[in-house]
Image (tube, rainbow, N blue to C red):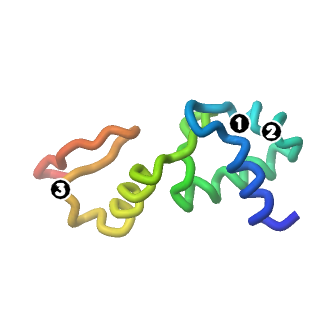
Amino acid sequence: MREEDLDWAVYHRIPETGDITVEDLVADTGFEPGAVTASLERLEHYLLIRKTGKMVRLLSIQESLIECQCRHTREDLPFVIENGVIRAKRSEE
């Protein structure tokens, strides 16, 4: 199976609201754990999901756009995002 097809299948097994564990995602998809983990890493790199520990959730369009902006203009932004919380940068950051 191509990576794109695997990613599509994994992405669509993540609930639109709420979280799912990686183990449940492996069970739901029937794919090998290593394949699911690699897919989740790609999906997170492309700012489509957030993986926190063993939990996975979809990013909203707004979250994805903000994360994208932060990734590409990090030094210029007056704020940082940490664990889903937006806060103003301190002068020493």
Q: Residues at badges 2 and 3 in contact (C-beta under 8 Å)?
A: no
Q: Badge 2 local density, few (<14 within 10 Å), some, or many (20+)?
A: some
Local SS, label 2: helix
Q: Is residue 29 above or below residue 43?
A: above
Which circle's residue, 3 or 1, is located before the other in the chain?
1
x and y, in percent, of residue 69 in the image: 35, 63
x and y, in percent, of residue 89 in the image: 18, 49
Name the residue rendered at 39%, 52% in the picture. 62
Q: Is residue 91 above or below residue 51?
A: below
- Residue topped by disc 3: 78
Q: Is residue 16 left or right of residue 33?
A: left
x and y, in percent, of residue 77 in the image: 22, 60
Amino acid bearing label 2: Val
Compare residues 78 and 59 and report the one nearer the observer.
59
Which circle's residue, 2 or 3, is located before the other in the chain?
2
Q: Residues at badges 2 and 1 in contact (C-beta under 8 Å)?
A: yes
Local SS, label 3: loop
Numbered badge on residue 26: 2
Q: Is residue 35 above or below residue 21?
A: below
Name the residue rendered at 22%, 51% in the picture. 79
- The alpha-carbon separation of the residues under discs 3 and 1 comes to 34 Å
Q: Is residue 14 left or right of residue 45?
A: right
Q: Badge 1 local density, few (<14 within 10 Å), some, or many (20+)?
A: some
Which of the 4 image quarters holds residue 5? bottom right
Quadrant placement of the N terminus: bottom right
- Residue topped by disc 1: 22
- The alpha-carbon separation of the residues under discs 2 and 3 comes to 39 Å
Local SS, label 1: helix
Amino acid bearing label 3: Pro
Q: Badge 3 local density, few (<14 within 10 Å), some, or many (20+)?
A: few
